[in-house]
Each structure stands twice: as C-alpha cells, then as structure tokens.
Image (cartoon, rainbow, N blue to C red):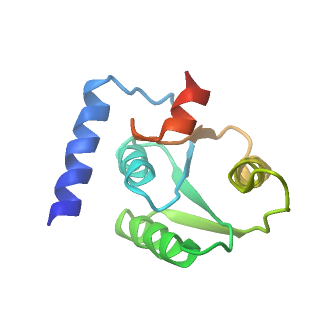
Amino acid sequence: MAVARRLIELKERVREKALTLPAGAVVVALSGGADSACAAWLASEHGDPCRAIHVDHGLPGSTGMRAAAQAVAERLQMDLDVVEVSIPSGSSPEGQARSVRYRARLERLREGEWRLTGHTSDDQAETVLMN
C-alpha cells in the first residue's frame, strides 16, 4: 500500500533526525494527515502514556480528516479526544483556524504532558513559523 510505505519512509526520516521525546506523557496533535500520523506512530512507540487530540473545524474536508485521525488512533490503540470548534470570521480564515486549534489543544493539555506536533517539509506556513 502506497500510503503505508509513505508513512514508514517518513517515520524513518524523522528517526534519522534524532527525534528524542522527553520522558513523560505525550499528547499528539493528530490532524489526520501523514505528518501527524507519523508523529503519533513515533509517540506510541515511546513507551510513556500517549494520547491524541483532533480539532474538527467544521470546514469542507473536516469530516474526512476526522475519520483519518480516528483511524490512526484506532490503529495505534491511542485514546483520541475530538474537539469541535467554530472558526470566527476574520481577514485570514487559515489564521483564525490556527488560533482556535492551538487554543483548543492548550485547553485540553493535562499537567505534565508534552505536546507533539508533526509537520512535513512542504508545510510552508508552519515551517516558516517554526524556523
């Protein structure tokens, strides 16, 4: 299966970059895309407690992303917290969605948990922000 091969290759590239998770519980931001699926896969092998949060924006395509996140979490036997949000109007729908998503994840972060997000190299907006 091409998708499985892509995830395995992505996982190995991340490992090669020496991703080392700190000790302790991890919560993964699981969008349903390949980048967050890989992050969830790595976190599930970490050995410490791990769960995921998916933010459903209620936008076109959100149903498919939610289903993908649920499938990944089920496959990894990972608890998944699905949070439904509304996007306020504004000049940048993407920016509004990002702000709501980040806030929703922070509000559900438990004491002592590490946050883990994954972004592929072609995720330009996030790459610029992270760098």
The answer to whether residue 74 is above or below residue 115 is: below
Residue 33 appears in which quarter of the rendering? bottom left
Placement of the N terminus among the 4 image quadrants? bottom left
Left or right of residue 22, residue 103 in this image: right
Tell me residue 86's x, y (percent): 79, 68
Q: Is residue 24 visible?
A: no
Tell me residue 27's x, y (percent): 58, 48
Tell me residue 105's x, y (percent): 71, 51
Residue at 55% x, 21% y is 131
The answer to whether residue 76 is above or below residue 117 is: below
Left or right of residue 1, residue 126 in this image: right
Question: How many numbered dots are placed on residues in this image?
Answer: 0
Left or right of residue 93, residue 62 in this image: left
Tell me residue 56's x, y (percent): 65, 68
Residue at the far right in the pictured view: 89
Identify which residue, 42 or 97, lies in the foreground: 97
Residue at 78% x, 49% y is 103
